Image (spheres, rainbow, N blue to C red):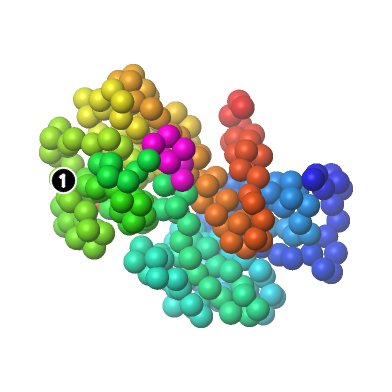
Amino acid sequence: MTRPAAFLPTAQTQLYCVIGNPVAHSKSPVMHNRAFAETGLDAVYLAFEAGDAGAAMSAVRQLGIQGVSVTVPHKVTVMEYLDEVDDRAKDVGAVNTVKNVAGRLVGRNTDGFGAVRALEDRTPLDSRRVAVVGAGGAARAVAFVAGWRGAKVTVVNRSPDRGRSLASEAGAAFLPLAEIQDLACDVIVNCTSVGMSPHKEESPVPAAVFKEGMVAMDIVYNPLRTRFLEDAATAGCEVVDGLSMFVYQGAAQFEWWTGELAPVEAMRQTVLDALGYPG
Ligand code: ATR
């Protein structure tokens, strides 16, 4: 179902939003508004630049905002202002999604599930060797969820302390980035921001790491085809771009908030258009 182009919100229209700082370049609003339009839901989604996660959650309660995407720098601090955080988000240590359930604010994390769903379009993860490059927020989400899916995870990180700590929490192995030439894996995911525009020529790993038949995914989606993915494709790997993870984490938010199936293809196309990429 398609909503008329001239959609006029009324007093019944439900509000959803993203909070973060900065949020001016967030693609979540176009993606979720397209999803509302495709499914005909009487809802709108806005971006709010919020300096304080606690004040933002008070506003959510006061205004009856139905759902919130939480982005940098609030994914960790927001947790203390919620009524409930699901156990998986507690393990990951961050919340990227809040649902207002009749006045109770409940937190989840869909980032790792987005990544895993994008990977599972190409390969099952159960018993596969998955290398997670990085040890920041994104790496935490991917390492935990891949582990829950039965993958044998190795955290590969530049600073050993941070990498070892994530590996031990997630039940994963650890390899220092400096020793990545020793890596044997079926799937490799760049969970660092290395290669993001304007540093398009950079990759966190040497090209020799990629072997034919591996699946390589990048969480960076600007550019869509990063140096990491270019090197992987040249070596004969299957590549999964970062937009897939972004769209699937958004789809999981949408499905939790609304109970409707997310129109994933339309959401992806809308974000591609917003980024100025050809379809
Ligand atoms: P986020 O939480 O958004 O994932 P982050 O916490 O800043 O981001 O984490 C960035 C990750 O990218 C870290 O694992 C970082 O490695 P260190 O723990 O050694 O700092 C990694 N990273 C950043 N720049 C890097 C670079 N030039 N080479 C390799 N790894 C890098």
Name the residue located 66 percent from the left edge and 39 percent from the top edge: 266
| Magenta residues (range) | 117-123
Question: Can you see residue 154?
Answer: yes
Side (left or right) of 237 relative to 198: left
Query: Crowding at label 1, few (<14), some or many (≥20) Cα neighbours within 10 Å?
Result: many
Name the residue located 31 percent from the left edge and 37 percent from the top edge: 187
Name the residue located 53 percent from the left edge and 73 percent from the top edge: 106
Side (left or right) of 239 relative to 160: right
Residue 194 x, y percent position in the rendering: 34, 39
> Which image quarter is the N terminus in?
top right
Name the residue nearer the viewer: 15 or 116.
116
Q: Amino acid at mark 1?
A: Leu
Name the residue nearer the viewer: 68 or 112.
112
Residue 251 x, y percent position in the rendering: 58, 51
Name the residue nearer the viewer: 157 or 213.
213
Q: Could you say which quadrant of the image residue 196 lies in?
A: top left
Residue 52 x, y percent position in the rendering: 51, 71
Name the residue located 55 percent from the left edge and 54 percent from the top edge: 252
Q: Is residue 161 one of those drawn in magenta?
A: no
Circle count? 1
Question: Can you see residue 218?
Answer: no
Residue 70 x, y percent position in the rendering: 52, 62
- Figure check: 136 above or below 204: below
Q: Is residue 119 one of those drawn in magenta?
A: yes
- Figure check: 68 above or below 58: above
Residue indicated by mark 1: 175
Q: Which element is circle 1 on?
A: strand
